[in-house]
Image: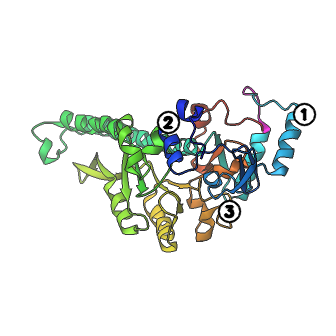
């Protein structure tokens, strides 16, 4: 409402600044208290404004919560180091333990802290992809074992009958085709299934799985991720899309003294990503039948499930985790993501909570962050 040229508009986001000016919200707030923000008018008077934006979900405890302020002040006065990267950061460990215990599942959670919500999404995507690559590696190893075993068998039984299509080509051609499949495994793209109208962030990976094409299309060439968007609350379309992610490999087997080609079906799906309540998508709730259906599909097909509670978690639905309202087996949720109000309205922090049984212990070395585990 100032109409004046600002440093924010000049040096940071000129288009956004002009938009706020046209909406008459081009003010600089000088103070926050509880649910109110305050700015100074032309007379120097403080004007209070009810904050219905709530920091996009970051200020569920209000602005400058007095208990949090007192704790921060206490830590600073004690001289607790903010940056002690080469050490055991027990304050982060205690928070991770608390999150694991408060989550309504039986299985322990390993938590990776991040600097934002979109980084929590990226963290889960990376871990899920590491697990997918581990699965592809195991399939490749099984192909190589099959090749070695059948090569030795054929050496000892060279008169055995080959499959019809290889009787002229010979066994060398057959075993070459079996081994060639390992190269195809390396070339398979990561696949994510996500909901239309979803929002998961604007960093390179997260924006790729975000439903709004306005954010996504300009940066599509930066990522090799294959994303399949499905209609929210449409279980049938989800199952159909999962089935499209299966591929077949061929192995050699001996049956009735004859070499045959047998097929194995495998799933190439890094993860299915879902917000229990879509925020930017229009405050759309997942149906109970949809969530329970996903639980059954997961048991049937064995994919990894990422639940994004960055907007809807931290008590905003009356429970700490929005997924708790659906009364499913919480241990079917492989990854749970938090941020926003996890920082108490003062700190930029996110969390990726992964089930201990699928956690790859190498990930703590592969994925690190300078600031993510800092003490407040």
Residue 351 is situated, as x and y percent measured from the top left of the image, at: 64, 46
Would you call the spot at circle 1 few (<14 residues within 10 Å), some (14-19), or many (20 or more)? few
Vertical side of 250 occupied by 36: above or below? below
Q: Tell which tag, 2 or 1, sits nearer the viewer.
A: 2
Residue at horizontal 67 percent and vertical 36 percent from the top: 372
Would you call the spot at circle 2 few (<14 residues within 10 Å), some (14-19), or many (20 or more)? some
| Labelled disc at residue 14 | 2
Residue 231 is situated, as x and y percent measured from the top left of the image, at: 38, 63
Is disc 2 placed on a helix, strand or loop?
helix
**Residue located beneath label 1 in the image:** 78
| Labelled disc at residue 22 | none
Q: Earlier in the sequence, mark 3 or mark 2?
A: 2
* Residue 337 as seen in the image, left or right of residue 185: right
Residue farthest toward the left in the current orientation of the protein: 168
Quadrant position of residue 309: bottom right
Residue at horizontal 63 percent and vertical 54 percent from the top: 57
Q: Which residues are magenta?
A: 85-90
> Chief secondary structure of the magenta span?
loop
């Amino acid at each position: 409402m100032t109409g004046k040229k600002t440093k924010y508009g000049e040096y940071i986001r000129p288009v956004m600044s002009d938009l706020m000016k046209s909406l008459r919200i081009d003010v600089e707030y000088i103070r926050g208290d509880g649910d109110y923000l305050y700015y100074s008018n032309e007379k120097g008077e403080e004007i209070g404004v009810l904050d219905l934006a709530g920091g996009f979900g970051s200020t569920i405890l209000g602005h400058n919560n007095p208990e949090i302020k007192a704790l921060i002040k206490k830590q600073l006065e004690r001289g607790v180091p903010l940056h002690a990267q080469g050490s055991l950061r027990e304050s982060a460990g205690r928070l991770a333990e608390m999150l694991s215990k408060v989550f309504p599942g039986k299985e322990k959670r390993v938590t990776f802290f991040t600097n934002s919500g979109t980084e929590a999404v990226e963290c889960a995507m990376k871990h899920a992809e590491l697990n997918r690559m581990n699965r592809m590696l195991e399939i490749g190893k099984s192909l190589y074992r099959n090749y070695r075993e059948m090569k030795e068998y054929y050496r000892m039984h060279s008169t055995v009958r080959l499959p019809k299509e290889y009787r002229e080509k010979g066994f060398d051609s057959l075993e070459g085709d079996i081994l060639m499949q390992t190269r195809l495994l390396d070339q398979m793209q990561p696949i994510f299934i996500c909901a239309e109208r979803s929002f998961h962030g604007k960093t390179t990976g997260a924006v790729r799985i975000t439903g709004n094409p306005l954010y996504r299309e300009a940066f599509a060439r930066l990522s090799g991720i294959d994303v399949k968007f499905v209609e929210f609350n449409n279980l049938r379309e989800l199952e159909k899309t999962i089935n499209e992610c299966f591929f077949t490999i061929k192995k050699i087997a001996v049956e009735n003294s004859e070499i045959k080609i047998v097929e194995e079906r495998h799933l190439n799906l890094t993860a299915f990503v879902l917000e229990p309540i879509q925020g930017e998508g229009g405050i759309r709730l997942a149906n109970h039948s949809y969530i329970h259906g996903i639980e059954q599909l997961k048991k049937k097909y064995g994919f990894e499930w990422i639940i994004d509670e960055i907007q809807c978690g931290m008590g905003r639905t009356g429970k700490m985790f929005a997924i708790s309202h659906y009364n499913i087996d919480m241990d079917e949720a492989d990854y749970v993501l938090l941020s926003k109000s996890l920082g108490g309205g003062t700190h930029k922090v996110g969390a990726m909570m992964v089930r201990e049984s699928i956690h790859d212990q190498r990930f703590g070395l592969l994925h690190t962050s300078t600031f993510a585990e800092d003490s407040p």
